[in-house]
Amino acid sequence: MSNINFKEFIWFDLGPKPPEMMISVSETGGFTFNSPAREALPLHIKIGILPDGKRVCVVEDPTSGYTLPKSGTVKRPELVGHIVSAGIVLPARYSMRREDNCWVAELQAPTTKKRLPAKNPRKISKSAEESILKELKDGKRR
């Protein structure tokens, strides 16, 4: 018999993570809403960006002629241009949430890609090394 008191434990529900709404801004000029964001957003939208580029606001605008494409990618140079001119380094990611009558997206800290270590330099044979050193000494190689 074990004497485990289950009430002492802190329990975690490890069910599926709720989908996170995101916006990705690429170097190629794409302003892309991921699928959870596309599903949540209305068809006709207007996009606002703060002057510092760190916050984006998306509102429904039935009067606008702009319809969010199925791909979720908005190719508007003025959007990406404003973000770049504000000093935001691309690619950039924004995390979205519903707030009042709009969807607010906050700039996420850039993720650093893991750099693979450089390959070890090729080793040369002793005779080749001696030959190169001799050529350097004789002035035949620079």
Image (cartoon, helix red, strand yellow):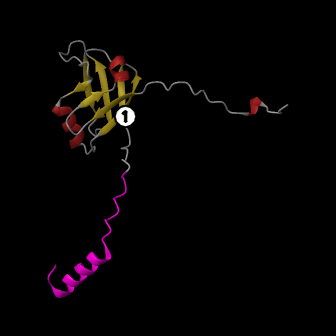
Quadrant in the picture for the C terminus: bottom left
Indicate the position of residue 64 as horizontal and vertical percent values.
Answer: 20, 16
Indicate the position of residue 89 as horizontal and vertical percent values.
Answer: 27, 45
Q: Which range is magenta?
A: 115-142
Quadrant in the picture for the N terminus: top right
| Helix, strand or loop under label 1 | strand
Give the farthest residue toward the left: 140
Front residue of this view, candidates 88 and 50: 88
Is residue 54 in view?
no
Q: Which residue is mark 1?
A: 106
Say which residue appears at 17% left-offset and 87% top-offset.
138
Is residue 13 in view?
yes
Where is 105 relative to 119, above or below? above
Say which residue appears at 33% left-offset and 36% top-offset.
93
Q: Is residue 8 magenta?
A: no
Q: Is residue 34 left or right of residue 27?
A: right
Instruction: Give the total number of marks visible in the rendering.
Output: 1
Give the farthest residue toward the bottom: 138
Q: Examine the image and state in which quarter residue 31 appears.
A: top left
